[in-house]
Amino acid sequence: MMSLHVSQQAVSDMTPDTVAELASRLETDSYDSAFEGLQDWHLLRAIAFQRPELVESYVYLLDLEPYDES
């Protein structure tokens, strides 16, 4: 089974333009396989956790919702 690992360096190298391109690919969903889309989704998710300022406009693509534990 293949494991997906997003390196800190990959996230550090992201710019607003590269994040916009990533989000555009996810929005159009024109991948050859579901796994390619999933890989982009995981990358966007990693960016959201490590550099949230880059993902503010694209959070809707991640379906992240706050949870109330009470």
Image (tube, rainbow, N blue to C red):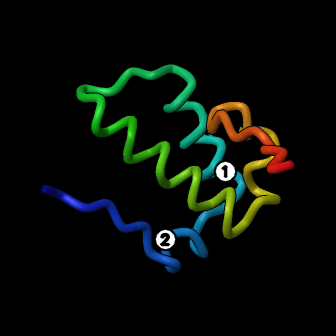
Residue shown at 58% from the left, 52% from the top: 45
How many labels, in total? 2
Q: Nearer the viewer, residue 45 or 17?
A: 45
Disc 1 crowd, CA 10 A, few/some/many (<14, 14-19, 20+)? few
Q: Nearer the viewer, residue 9 or 4?
A: 4
Residue shown at 56% from the left, 69% from the top: 11
Tag 1's secondary structure? Answer: helix
The residue at the far front in this view is 70
Tell me whether the residue at label 1 lies in contact with that at label 2, contact meaning CB atoms closer than 8 angstroms: no
The disc labelled 2 sits on which kind of residue? Ala
The disc labelled 1 sits on which kind of residue? Asp
The percent coordinates of residue 47 (x first, y second) are 62, 60
Residue 21, picture quadrant: top right
Tag 2's secondary structure? Answer: helix
The percent coordinates of residue 20 (x first, y second) are 65, 42
Residue 3, picture quadrant: bottom left
Residue shown at 13% from the left, 56% from the top: 1
Where residue 56 is drawn, which disc sits there?
Answer: none
Q: Nearer the viewer, residue 57 or 46?
A: 46
The percent coordinates of residue 60 (x first, y second) are 72, 32
Residue that badge 2 annotates: 10
The percent coordinates of residue 58 (x first, y second) are 72, 38
Disc 2 crowd, CA 10 A, few/some/many (<14, 14-19, 20+)? few
Where residue 17 is drawn, which disc sits there?
Answer: 1
